[in-house]
Image (cartoon, rainbow, N blue to C red):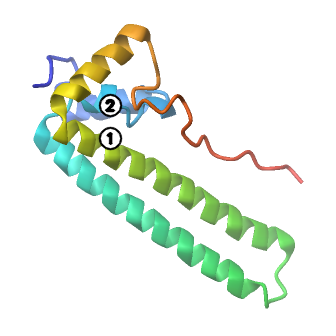
Amino acid sequence: MPHSDPAATPVDFLLQLLQATPEQHGSVAHLSKLNPVALDYLQRKAADLHHCAVGEARELLDIALESLDLPLSLEHQRRLIERADDELASAQRWGELAANARFCLQRPELAQQLAGDARATGSDDAAGDGGKRSRGRERSAG
């Protein structure tokens, strides 16, 4: 059962998520505060957004492939590929959020325990991946 927290309303929780660092947004520590109905909704919506972002990335890559036969500048082609890469990074984040919400929904006691451990150690890595999540790629200026 989730513990008492100032972020008791969905709006408060969303504000708290927006103020968190990007690595914390979908962390078990944050998600374990939600009730099962909210976790289920979040899991379903994040999974939907994951699939949409993957679909968008595939479409952008299809366009990029078709554009190879057109006289587009390298800059335009690079922008298409970068946009597809952005969509894939977004899909990964949505997928992680959906997985973490599903974990908190299916294993609430363990999620609470992990959230407590993360808060006690000050860790940003409540998901237990050792900080190995994708942090996006740096793009060259030229």
Q: Is residue 18 left or right of residue 81?
A: left
Distance between the alpha carbons at the discs numbered 1 and 2 = 6 Å
User: Residue drawn 41% across and 34% down?
Assistant: 25
Judge by depth and name the residue closer to the eye, 85 or 130.
130
User: Residue drawn 40% across and 59% down?
Assistant: 50
Q: In which quadrant is the C terminus drawn?
A: bottom right
- Find numbered disc 1 in the image and state the secondary structure of the residue it sits on: helix
The location of residue 53, given as percent across then percent down, is 46, 63
Task: State how many labels appear.
Answer: 2
Residue 28, placed above or below residue 102: above
Cβ–Cβ under 8 Å for marks 1 and 2: yes
Residue 74, placed above or below residue 37: below
Q: Which numbered circle lies on residue 46?
A: none
User: Residue drawn 58% across and 43% down?
Assistant: 134
Q: In which quadrant is the N terminus drawn?
A: top left
Residue 102 visible somewhere in the drawing: yes
Which residue is the site of mark 2?
A: 28
Q: Which amino acid type corresponds to the residue marked 1 in the rendered image? A: Asn
Query: Outermost residue toward the top?
Result: 120
Q: Is residue 17 left or right of residue 41?
A: right
Residue 9 visible somewhere in the drawing: no
Residue 137, placed above or below residue 52: above
Classed neighbour count for the residue bearing mark 2: other residues with Cα under 10 Å, few (<14), some (14–19), many (≥20): many
The location of residue 58, given as percent across then percent down, is 55, 74
Q: Is residue 112 left or right of residue 75?
A: left
Judge by depth and name the residue closer to the eye, 12 or 88.
88
Which residue is the site of mark 1?
A: 100
Q: Earlier in the sequence, mark 1 or mark 2?
A: 2
Q: Which amino acid type corresponds to the residue marked 2 in the rendered image? A: Val
- Find numbered disc 2 in the image and state the secondary structure of the residue it sits on: helix
